[in-house]
Image (cartoon, rainbow, N blue to C red):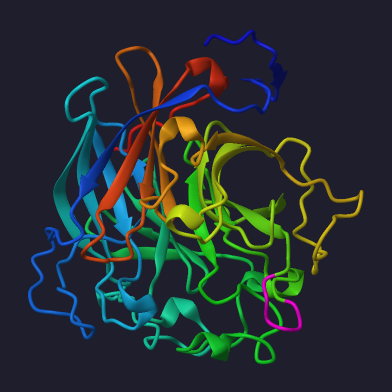
C-alpha cells in the first residue's frame, strides 16, 4: 500500500513518520543444525560438539554484491563453557518471491578469527584477562558491520569491545569504548562480574549485542542489550529492573563518542541488533527471552536519533522514567514478528531473533530485509533466516551503504 508522504526534511534527509511497515514475509530459509561449516576443523570441542558445526548466527551484513552476506557465529555452545574457535562466514542468501523455495542459503566460506598476534580467539569464558578485555583470548561476537575498505567490524559482548578485523580474520585494532561500559574486574563466571565486585559496566552476557555502521562508513553504533549496572540494570535482589539502555555512537577515525538512551518497553526485554536506515534512523530488535508459544514480545522497532540527548556525561541513568532534561531516541514498532499474518508465533517460534540486514532490491521494487534466528548450536534446531519485503515508502530516507572494496 502506497502511503501519502507525511515526512519532513531534517538534516537533508527525507523521512517518513515512525509507523508500522506494510511488510510481508516472503519465506523462511533454513540450514540444518547439524550442518558443518567450511572451517576445515576436525574433532570435537570440550563439550562434545563438533568443531566445525555451523550455527549460533548472531548477526549478518549484506556485502552489496549479488546475494552475498557475511555472518558471524557467537561464542559457541554451552554459554562459554566450550573452546569454540570464533569465526565468520560468507554465504549466498537468495530471495526469489513466489518460487517453490523462496529463500535458499548456501555457505561459501568460513574464516577463523585471531588477535593482533595471530592467536586464535575463542568463546571460552575462562580465557579472560582480569582487567583488560583486549588482552584476553575470549571473544563473543554479537554484531557485525562491513567497513568500506573491506574490513569487518565486530562487537564483543564480553568486553564490551568494538574491534576491526581484516578479511583474513586477523584483528587490526580495538576501538575505544568508554570505560564506564566495562566492569572493573573480569572473571570466568558471571557471579564474578556482578555486584559487589562490580558496581559499573555491562551485566554479564548482556553487553554490546548489536552493531551498525552509518551509510558513509564513518560512524559505528553499538547497542547494549540491557542497562548498565550503574543505570539500574539489577535491583537489590539481582533481578533486571532498569529500562534505559545506552546506544553508543563511535567515530571510527577519531574515536569520538556520543551516547543516547533507548527506553525498553519492559525490563524483561533486551535489545539484540541495530541496522542503519540512514545517518540518524535505525531498525532495532527488541524482544523477550521466551521461546515457542510462550513468546510475547518480538519486535523490530524503528528509532530516530534526532533531538535525542547525548548522555555521555551522565554517570547514572534512572531505573525508570527519565527526567525532562533527557530526551531518549524516538521509537515506534516497525514489524511485529508475532503478528498473526506472518504465522511465526507458536510452538516453533525462535527465542532469539538476533540478526538484521537489508538485502538487494526485489524485482517488484520492494526492499528486502532478512532476520536471522540464533539456534544456540542445538543440532536438532535449524538455523532460520526470515526474509521480508517492505514497501519503499515505508523506508523513506533509506541510504544503502557502499559495497566494501573486497
- 87 with respect to 255 (left or right): left
Q: Which residues are magenta?
A: 235-240
Q: Is residue 302 magenta?
A: no
Please tell me which residue lies in front, 168 or 21.
Answer: 21
The residue depicted at 67 percent of the width and 58 percent of the height is 246
Q: Nearer the viewer, residue 308 or 226?
A: 226
Q: Is residue 55 above or below residue 239?
A: above
Residue at position x 77%, y 47% from top? 328
Asked if 298 appears above or below 178 in the picture, the reply is: above
Point 69% across, 78% down: residue: 200
Total labels: the figure holds 0
Q: Quadrant of residue 393?
A: top right
Does residue 138 appear anywhere in the picture? Answer: no
Q: From the viewer's side, name the closer residue of 195 and 114.
A: 195
Q: From this viewpoint, is residue 384 visible? A: yes
Q: Is residue 26 above or below residue 107?
A: above
Residue at x-position 39% and y-position 53%: 350
As drawn, is 179 to the left or to the right of 191?
Answer: right
Amino acid at each position: 500500500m502506497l502511503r501519502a508522504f507525511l515526512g519532513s526534511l531534517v538534516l537533508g534527509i527525507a523521512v517518513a513518520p515512525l509507523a508500522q511497515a506494510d511488510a510481508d514475509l516472503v519465506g523462511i530459509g533454513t540450514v540444518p543444525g547439524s550442518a558443518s561449516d567450511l572451517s576445515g576443523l576436525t574433532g570435537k570441542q570440550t563439550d562434545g560438539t563438533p568443531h566445525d558445526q555451523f550455527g549460533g548466527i548472531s548477526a549478518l551484513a549484506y556485502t552489496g554484491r549479488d546475494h552475498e552476506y557475511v555472518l558471524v557465529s557467537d561464542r559457541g555452545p554451552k554459554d562459554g563453557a566450550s573452546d569454540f574457535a570464533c569465526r565468520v562466514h560468507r554465504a549466498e542468501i537468495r530471495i526469489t518471491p513466489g518460487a517453490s523455495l523462496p529463500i535458499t542459503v548456501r555457505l561459501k566460506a568460513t574464516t577463523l578469527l585471531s588477535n593482533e598476534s595471530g592467536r586464535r580467539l575463542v568463546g571460552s569464558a575462562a580465557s579472560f584477562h582480569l582487567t583488560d578485555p583486549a588482552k584476553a583470548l575470549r571473544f563473543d561476537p554479537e554484531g557485525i558491520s562491513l567497513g568500506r575498505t573491506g574490513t569487518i567490524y565486530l562487537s564483543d559482548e564480553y568486553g564490551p569491545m568494538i574491534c576491526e578485523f581484516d578479511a583474513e580474520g586477523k584483528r587490526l585494532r580495538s576501538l575505544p569504548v568508554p570505560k564506564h561500559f566495562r566492569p572493573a574486574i573480569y572473571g570466568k563466571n558471571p557471579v564474578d562480574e556482578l555486584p559487589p565486585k562490580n558496581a559499573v559496566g555491562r551485566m554479564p552476557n548482556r553487553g554490546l549485542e548489536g552493531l551498525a555502521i552509518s551509510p558513509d562508513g564513518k560512524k559505528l553504533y553499538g547497542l547494549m542489550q540491557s542497562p548498565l549496572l550503574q543505570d539500574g540494570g539489577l535491583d537489590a535482589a539481582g533481578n533486571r529492573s532498569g529500562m534505559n539502555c545506552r546506544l553508543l555512537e563511535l567515530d571510527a577515525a577519531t574515536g569520538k563518542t556520543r551516547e543516547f538512551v533507548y527506553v525498553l518497553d519492559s525490563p524483561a526485554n533486551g535489545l539484540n541488533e541495530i541496522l542503519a536506515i540512514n545517518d540518524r534512523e535505525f531498525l532495532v530488535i527488541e524482544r523477550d527471552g521466551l521461546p515457542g508459544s510462550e513468546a510475547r514480545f518480538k519486535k523490530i522497532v524503528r528509532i530516530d536519533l534526532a533531538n535525542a540527548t547525548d548522555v555521555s556525561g551522565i554517570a547514572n541513568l534512572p531505573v525508570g522514567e527519565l527526567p525532562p532534561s533527557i530526551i531518549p531516541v524516538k521509537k515506534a514498532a516497525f514489524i511485529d514478528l508475532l503478528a498473526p499474518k506472518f504465522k511465526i508465533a507458536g510452538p516453533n517460534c525462535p527465542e532469539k531473533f538476533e540478526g538484521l540486514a537489508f538485502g538487494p532490491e526485489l524485482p517488484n521494487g520492494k526492499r528486502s530485509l532478512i532476520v536471522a534466528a540464533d539456534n544456540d548450536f542445538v543440532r536438532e534446531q535449524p538455523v532460520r533466516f526470515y526474509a521480508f519485503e517492505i514497501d519503499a515508502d515505508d523506508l523513506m530516507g533509506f541510504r544503502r551503504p557502499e559495497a566494501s572494496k573486497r
